[in-house]
Amino acid sequence: MTRQITLSLGLALLVGAGVWFGVSRLPVRPESRSIAVIAISGNGKTIVSGTSPGHILVWDAGSANVVQEMEERDGALKDLLLDENALVVANRNLVLRGLGGGKTRRVLRGDGANYGTIRRHPTEAALLTVTGRGEIAVVNLADGRITPKACCSTIYGEVAFAPDGRTFLAAGHWPGIWEYATGRLIARFTREREFIPFGPIAVDGDRVFMGSQDGRVLVWDLETRGFVRASAPVNGYVRTIVVLGKTGWVAYAASGGAVQLWNAGSGERREIASAVTTSNLVYDSVRNRLAFGTAAGALQFWSPPPYGSH
C-alpha cells in the first residue's frame, strides 16, 4: 500500500548563529501515535519509524509516501536498523524484515534475550547489540551466531563500533572499550563503576559522547580514553545523542524533552524548545537535517545552518 502524506512547514527558530527550520511533519495513523524509534538508510532515501508496541512504517523520504507497514509484537520495540534492503528489528528477539519487493521475515535470534541497541559493523556482516541480561554481543547477520560476547552493560546503555571497526564500545555503569575479534576488554572510560549509568553513545572521529542519567553529555578521547569535558545538565536522563555532521555540534534530548544543541569545543548550548522528541535522534547526512519522532505520531525534520568550526 502506498499512501500520500501532506507536508506542513514547521516553525523557524533562531538558534545561535543561524536558523533551524522544522521543514516538514509526516503524520501517521491515530492508532499508531507516539513514535519510539526511527532509523534512516545510509543513502537518505528511506526512513523507518516504530512505536513501542511494534507498529512499523517504512517511508520514502523524498516523496513522503508510506510504502510499507508491518507489525512486530514480540515484546516492546527497542531499536531499528536499516541494512540495505532489509530492516533489523530488536524487541524480545532479533528479526530481519525484507523491504520493497522482498517482504520476507526471518528470525535472526529467537532466544527471548530482550535485545536493545543494534549497530552495524562498518565493513563486515555483523551486528553489535546488548541484551536484557547485560551481555554485549556480536551477532553474525548470515546465521545469527554470537561471536564474541562481552560483559557487561545495561539495557539502557547503548553500544557502538569504533570508526575502524576493530573495537566496540558500551555504556552502562562502567563504560569501556573491547576488542571486536575476541571480545577482550581493553580499557575503561571511568576509574570505577559508576552509580549513575550512561546510556546513549555517539562516536565522532576520536571523540566519544555518552549521555548520562544525571542529564549531562560527557566526552572522552577514543585513543587515550581520557576525559575531555561535560555539558551542563538537562532535566531528565539523556536518552539520545547524534553528531550533526561536520558542524562541531551534537544534538541530544532527555526522554520526552526538547532537543538540545551542544558544541563540545566551545561549550555553547542551545535548546530548540518546540522540538520535543519521543524517539531517538538521527542525522540525515544526504539532506543535512535532523529527524525524530513525536508523541503525536509525526516525524519532524530540522535543517541546521552551516555552523562551521565554531
Image (cartoon, rainbow, N blue to C red):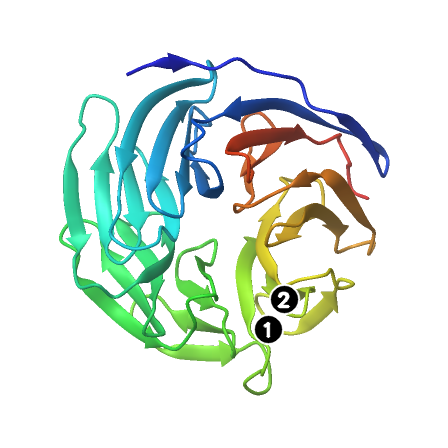
User: Disc 1 designates what residue?
Assistant: 225
**Which residue: 46% across, 62% down?**
158
Q: Secondary structure at mark 2?
A: strand
**Which residue: 76% across, 41% down?**
273
Query: How many discs mark residues in the rendered view?
Result: 2
Left or right relative to 263: residue 238: left
**Labels 2 and 1 touching (C-beta < 8 A):** yes
User: Disc 2 designates what residue?
Assistant: 221
Q: Secondary structure at mark 1?
A: loop
Q: Is residue 68 visible?
A: yes
**Which residue: 53% across, 64% down?**
199
Determine whether 59 is above or below 200 in the image.
above
Query: In whole angstroms, how far apart are the C-alphas of marks 2 and 1?
Result: 5 Å
Classify the position of the N terminus by image quarter: top left
Residue flagged by tag 2: what amino acid is it? Answer: Asp
- Which residue of the protein is positioned furthest toward the bottom in this rendering? 192
**Which residue: 25% across, 59% down?**
139
Classify the position of the C terminus by image quarter: top right
Front-lying residue, 212 or 137: 212
Q: Is residue 206 visible?
A: no
User: Measured from the top left, where is residue 284 in percent x and y?
Assistant: 54, 32
Left or right relative to 40: residue 102: left
Front-lying residue, 98 or 128: 98
Numbered mark located on residue 310 in the image: none
User: Measured from the top left, where is residue 178 in percent x and y?
Assistant: 41, 72
User: Measured from the top left, where is residue 19 in percent x and y?
Assistant: 80, 29
